[in-house]
Image (cartoon, grey):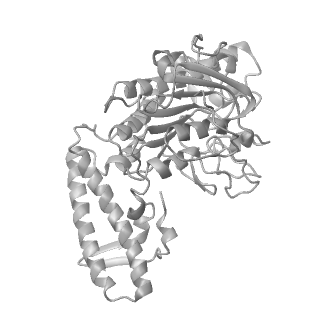
């Protein structure tokens, strides 16, 4: 997605006429119409999802003992066993870019960029893999990408690195972290428009369209009165107005696709399992209706103090992650990590049972499930937990556990997933090559 500020049109510009007044800030996040279809491809474009959990994983309860196809699934990944043939467990990866004396402050924001951040209060790291994907497979959808979180807050700040990296895993550019929304009601509105019911959304969409028609007509009258420089400036603005129309039209097209949307969610659910399920449902609906192909989801925040009484774990998550190898604490921590996998598995099942062309949404997706931390007690980043779900239209083999040599960059896996999605990249972050076995 491009910001209109790149088009040299003043934010103070207002288009007026016939009772219509549209201020420029309303259009800041809109994709220029000229680039919407610039990168279309003949091959199908998979959905991509990057699902992050904080505080790492107990690795001997995550990574199977054996590699290949005949491995015994572990405790934390057990909920995903029904999708074994659609799962690729990738072990042995390291992300040196995420290693620092301030682990929680940078751990989330460096997961998908794999670039060590500058020591600065201002963000400066790497463009995340999801945003690279959005540039290529997201420009002809309503939203190039969608960023979600299971709970609010950034989690951790640091005197050297600031607060930019702990609350998001998505960076549009090296200096532009993207906020992650944790209110499913707001997400629903963003995906399908304002209004709690189909009837309300339909009425609002029609009203919006008539306002845009008025704005466009008055802009054409104004353009005839301006000099060359001002006409060019106004032309840029009209590109953004046309982009609004494109989004409106795509919203209206959804009404005839046969996909029955639920009413908008009430808001943040205090039951965390239901909150996670609702957020995953937003992703599934977005994929199903093709509102977006690229999503990121931070299931819980870094330094989360959430308790999990519902599964018999009253300890706060972050303190428990510093288990000091206490067997009782390890058992409770494994319960939390398995709980997160159970929520993810319910989402995977939803995709596997949703028809999509000649297969299911899961067949046509590439989902990375993992963390940028390994042993949470040590705050280390080696080896990282990573599992890929989905087959990406047959580009991902599935059904195997792969183990790579010491110090193999996590960026190699991200590069591989981008290439498997049809994205023409040769390097990502600190990658050294592709993982051809994936």
Instruction: Determine which quarter of the picture holds residue 61.
Output: top right
28 vs 287: above or below: below
Could you tell me residue 112's position as x and y percent?
61, 42
Looking at the rendered image, the quarter that the C terminus falls into is: top right
Is 234 or 376 nearer to us in this picture? Answer: 234
Is 94 or 395 nearer to us in this picture? Answer: 395
- Which residue is situated farthest in the right direction here? 101
Q: Residue sitting at 63 percent across and 36 percent down? A: 434
Instruction: Determine which quarter of the picture holds residue 153.
Output: top right
- Which residue is situated farthest in the front direction here? 42
Q: Residue sitting at 69 percent across and 44 percent down? A: 106
Q: Residue 393 vs residue 258: left or right?
A: right
Q: Residue sitting at 67 percent across and 55 percent down? A: 123
Q: Residue 184 vs residue 117: left or right?
A: left
Q: Residue 215 vs residue 127: left or right?
A: left
Q: Is residue 58 visible?
A: yes
Could you tell me residue 121's position as x and y percent?
71, 57
Q: Is residue 150 visible?
A: no
Could you tell me residue 423's position as x and y percent?
51, 45
Q: Residue sitting at 28 percent across and 49 percent down? A: 195
331 vs 210: above or below: above
Q: How many marks?
A: 0
Could you tell me residue 182's position as x and y percent?
48, 42
Is 150 or 435 nearer to us in this picture? Answer: 435
């Amino acid at each position: 997605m491009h910001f209109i500020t790149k088009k040299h049109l003043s934010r103070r510009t207002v288009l007026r006429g016939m009772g219509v007044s549209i201020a420029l800030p309303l259009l800041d996040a809109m994709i220029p119409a000229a680039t919407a279809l610039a990168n279309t491809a003949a091959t199908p474009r998979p959905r991509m999802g990057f699902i992050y959990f904080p505080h790492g994983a107990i690795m001997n309860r995550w990574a199977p003992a054996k590699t290949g196809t005949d491995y015994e699934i572990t405790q934390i990944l057990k909920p995903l066993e029904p999708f074994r043939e659609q799962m690729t467990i990738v072990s042995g990866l390291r992300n040196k870019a995420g290693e620092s004396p301030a682990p929680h402050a940078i751990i989330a924001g460096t997961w998908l960029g794999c670039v060590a951040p500058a020591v600065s209060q201002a963000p400066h790291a790497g463009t995340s893999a999801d945003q690279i994907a959005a540039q290529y497979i997201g420009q002809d959808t309503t939203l190039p990408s969608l960023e979600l979180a299971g709970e609010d807050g950034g989690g951790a700040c640091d005197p050297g690195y600031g607060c930019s990296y702990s609350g998001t895993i998505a960076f549009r550019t090296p200096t532009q972290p993207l906020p992650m929304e944790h209110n499913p009601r707001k997400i629903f509105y963003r995906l399908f428009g304002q209004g709690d019911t189909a009837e309300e959304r339909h009425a609002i969409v029609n009203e919006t369209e008539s306002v845009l028609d008025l704005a466009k007509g008055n802009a054409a009258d104004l353009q005839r009165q301006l000099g060359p420089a001002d006409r060019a400036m106004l032309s840029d603005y009209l590109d953004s107005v046309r982009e609004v129309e494109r989004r409106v039209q795509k919203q209206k097209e959804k009404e005839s696709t046969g996909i029955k949307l639920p009413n908008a969610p009430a808001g943040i659910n205090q039951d965390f399992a239901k909150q996670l399920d609702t957020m995953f449902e937003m992703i599934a609906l977005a994929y199903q209706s093709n509102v977006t192909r690229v999503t990121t989801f931070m299931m819980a925040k870094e330094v989360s103090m959430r308790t999990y009484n519902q599964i018999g774990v009253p300890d706060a998550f972050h303190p428990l992650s510093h288990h000091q190898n206490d067997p009782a604490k390890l058992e409770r921590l494994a319960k939390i990590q398995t709980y997160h996998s159970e929520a993810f598995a319910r989402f995977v099942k939803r995709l596997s049972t949703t028809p999509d062309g000649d297969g299911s949404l899961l067949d046509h997706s590439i989902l990375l499930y993992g963390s940028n931390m390994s042993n949470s007690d040590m705050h280390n980043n080696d080896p990282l937990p990573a599992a890929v779900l989905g087959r990406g239209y047959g580009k991902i083999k599935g059904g195997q556990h792969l183990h790579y040599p010491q110090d193999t960059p996590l960026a190699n896996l991200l590069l591989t997933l981008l290439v498997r999605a049809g994205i023409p990249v040769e390097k990502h972050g600190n990658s050294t090559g592709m993982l051809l076995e994936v």
